[in-house]
Amino acid sequence: MKSPVYSIRLKRYALFLTLLWPCLAHARRQLVWEDNFDGPTLNPLYWTCETGDGCNRGNCGWGNQELEYYTSRPENVRLENGRLVIEARRENMGGKPFTSARIKVPKVGTRWSSAFSDPQWIVVDLGADYAINRVKITWETAAARDYEVQLSGDQNSWTTLKAVAGNTALENDHTGLGGHGRYLRICSTGRATPYGYSIFELEAYGTPYAGSAVMSAGPARQEPAVGKAGEWTARLYPNQVLNGTLQLLSSEGIRQLELVDMSGRSWFVQLSQQGRGTGAYPLDVSHLPAGMYLLRLWNAQHATRLLKFMKQ
């Protein structure tokens, strides 16, 4: 008899869109849909099971070296007493040592919408500094007649990549753009209808901005992180990691650090010498596959910090 490795149980799943605009000091959340799991099986209108190991889609291991073979069997995914259960089992299938379930939400007609006034904007955090060369916007009928595509590194100073006036199309594909930043903003100043602005899809294309990386073949730079007086701050350079070198800069000595991926797998734990001064800690991440990672830090007072970086 196969014993389960772990299971996840959800009572209810709800999807929200966060809507941002300049005239309000807070974000408004709009309920798009929810599932109370009150049927005998998953609702196919809401959920889709992805099966296999990803190789049939040209993405073996689903891009994260996953060890599970995903199925739609009730042994791996089912509803029990109004709860969604996803269960991983230690059993060989499809050349993998475990089975589990991988489910996703299909498109349900979600969109971003704004208040019925001007100006309005939507801001997207790209997670790192990117050189953007293309932005594509798919509007609902409530489109923008006049708007600007903007980038920023800090959400305080904005650079305009493209200014649009008199737009009448519902799909705007802007190519040949030039600029970099972490935050992408569509700032709309003129509406095509009496209603607000509404976007079905916002797509950004580009590459990690090389100028944001602090890379040196020599010794690590002793440049402590900057924060308020007495506050422990830490940061990582470069982020994205384009080679095998990552620099951790900390305003306090590091006692211990642990690196995990987004599936929870621990890649290494390191202990530092007590009393080590502030500055840069070089980390070798050349052995890591491409993906997103979390670095947890402990100082001598057992306080913790959590940092995120992307390995290319």
Image (tube, rainbow, N blue to C red):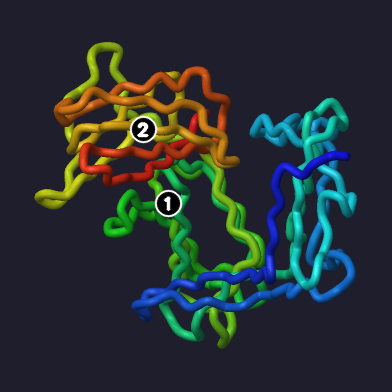
Chain-order first, disc 2 or disc 1:
1
Picture coordinates of residue 273 (x, y %)?
23, 23
Please tell me how crowded label 2 is: few (under 14), some (14-19), or many (20+) other residues with Cα within 10 Å.
Answer: some
Q: Amino acid at mark 1?
A: Leu
Picture coordinates of residue 9 (x, y %)?
70, 60
Q: Is residue 205 above or below residue 46?
A: above
Residue linked to disc 2 = 257
**In the displayed structure, does residue 65 sit left or right of residue 259?**
right
Q: Amino acid at mark 2?
A: Leu
Q: Nearer the viewer, residue 115 or 175?
A: 115
Query: Which image quadrant: the N terminus?
Result: top right
Q: Secondary structure at mark 1?
A: strand
**In the displayed structure, does residue 30 sit left or right of residue 13?**
left
Residue linked to disc 1 = 161
Marks 2/1: CA–CA distance: 40 Å
Picture coordinates of residue 75 (x, y %)?
86, 50
Q: Nearer the viewer, residue 212 or 132?
A: 212
Residue at 82% from the left image edge and 64% from the top image edge? 79
Q: Is residue 73 above or below residue 197?
A: above
| Visible residue check, residue 185 | yes
Q: Secondary structure at mark 2?
A: strand
Image quadrant where residue 296 sits: top left
Image quadrant where residue 95 sits: top right
Q: Is residue 182 above or below residue 209?
A: below
Q: Are marks 2 and 1 in contact (CB under 8 Å)?
A: no
| Visible residue check, residue 168 | no
The outermost residue toward the top is: 218
